[in-house]
Amino acid sequence: MHSKTLSFIGAGHMAEAIIAGLINTGHPAERIIATARSDKTLAPLQARYGIQTTTDNCNAIAQADVVVLAVKPQVMKEVCAQVTDIVARQRPLILSVAAGLTCATLSRWLGGYDAIVRAMPNTPSLVGTGACGLYATDAVSKEQCTLASDLMSAVGITEWVNEERLLSTVTAIAGSAPAYFFYLMEALEKAAIEQGMPLESARRLIIQTALGAARMCDASEDAPEEFKKRVMSPNGTTERAIFHFQDHGFEQLVNDAVQACFNRAEELGESLGSQ
Ligand SMILES: NC(=O)C1=CN([C@@H]2O[C@H](COP(=O)(O)OP(=O)(O)OC[C@H]3O[C@@H](n4cnc5c(N)ncnc54)[C@H](OP(=O)(O)O)[C@@H]3O)[C@@H](O)[C@H]2O)C=CC1
Ligand SMILES: O=C(O)[C@@H]1CCC=N1
């Protein structure tokens, strides 16, 4: 992996999360190239990680073993059109992290080039605890799949899915899901402040609790439901809170939000893919 040159087309939140994770695991900075439209975006990345940067997408791809497409889905078509010729000459593995856009759409936009793996990562990649879904069509070789796995495993865990639509599920439970947890943490902070606790104290306690809950699940085969029961003393405090969540439709609300996220990923794929 460390001998491969990785070019990131797009240097925003998701690209930076993966780049930071890769640098932390020892990937040589000189073997990472990032592009953006403006030097203003690139300068801080270059300063932070010592990577190569350029606003010339074709130049970045001309040196690449792997091209990570990390622009917004809405600008992907334009970017693909720009780089089709250099991709055909260089023949890198294309790893797209864009929500919704299918391998078929990306391949069409890249003039029929089909060595494409789709990934749906998340921003905790930044600290080496990413969770990433991967999907490849039959056109992708075993070696290319291994390369994609190796790249994303450097910044967290990976799960291959055998149906492309399941990447929309991965989007709804992992790609977008850090925001759900942040939202819950934000709401807990607000509740603590309302009860008179200083923000700093509340935040420390909430972060550690989230970390502890995740670590307990990670360290055991037991289901989250089991851990929940162990906190819920009969007629105790937790039970009162959980019953309140249940009485107010918490599980349905989560299900509906996950479905809305899934639907938006599919909708993005369909509307942009029809272009
Ligand atoms: N954010 C997240 O948590 C996740 C995002 N994704 C996917 O990652 C992709 C990027 O999202 P995110 O990082 O949040 O978006 P950002 O807006 O943070 O980053 C987009 C980047 O693309 C660059 N860019 C725009 N146009 C071009 C171009 N023509 N050539 C080269 N670079 C260009 C921008 O550069 P400039 O600043 O100069 O305009 C910017 O650096 C999306 O497709 C999204 O679906 C997937 C999983 C999680
Ligand atoms: O919100 C989005 O569209 C992107 C994709 C997954 C996370 N962020």
Image: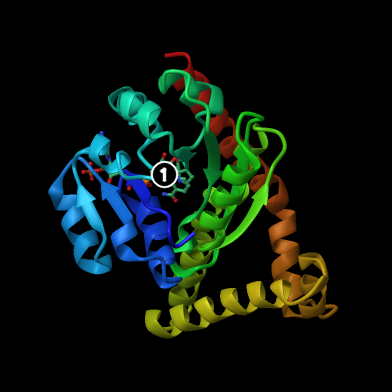
The x, y position of residue 106, in whole percent, is 47, 26
Q: Is residue 172 something that shows in the picture?
A: no
User: Image point 65% across, 48% down: which residue?
Assistant: 254
Q: Nearer the viewer, residue 213 or 175?
A: 175
- Mark 1 vs ligand 1: CB under 8 Å? no
User: Image point 69% across, 59% down: which residue?
Assistant: 245
Outermost residue, right direction? 234
The x, y position of residue 127, in whole percent, is 46, 69
Q: Nearer the viewer, residue 263 or 30?
A: 30
User: Image point 71% across, 45% down: which residue?
Assistant: 252
Q: Is residue 105 something that shows in the picture?
A: yes
Horizontal relation, residue 91 to residue 263: left or right: left
Q: Nearer the viewer, residue 107 or 264?
A: 107
| The C terminus: image quadrant | top left
Q: How many marks?
A: 1
Horizontal relation, residue 46 to residue 210: left or right: left
Q: Quadrant of residue 233?
A: bottom right
Q: Which class describes the residues within 10 Å of circle 1: few (<14), some (14-19), or many (20+)?
A: many
The x, y position of residue 26, in whole percent, is 42, 71
Q: Check disc 1 and give the amino acid type.
A: Val
Q: Secondary structure at mark 1?
A: strand
Residue 202 vs 14, above or below: the answer is below
The x, y position of residue 247, in whole percent, is 74, 55
User: Image point 32% across, 24% down: which residue?
Assistant: 85
Residue 35 vs 152, above or below: the answer is above
Residue 127 vs 112, above or below: the answer is below
Give the residue at mark 1.
Answer: 68
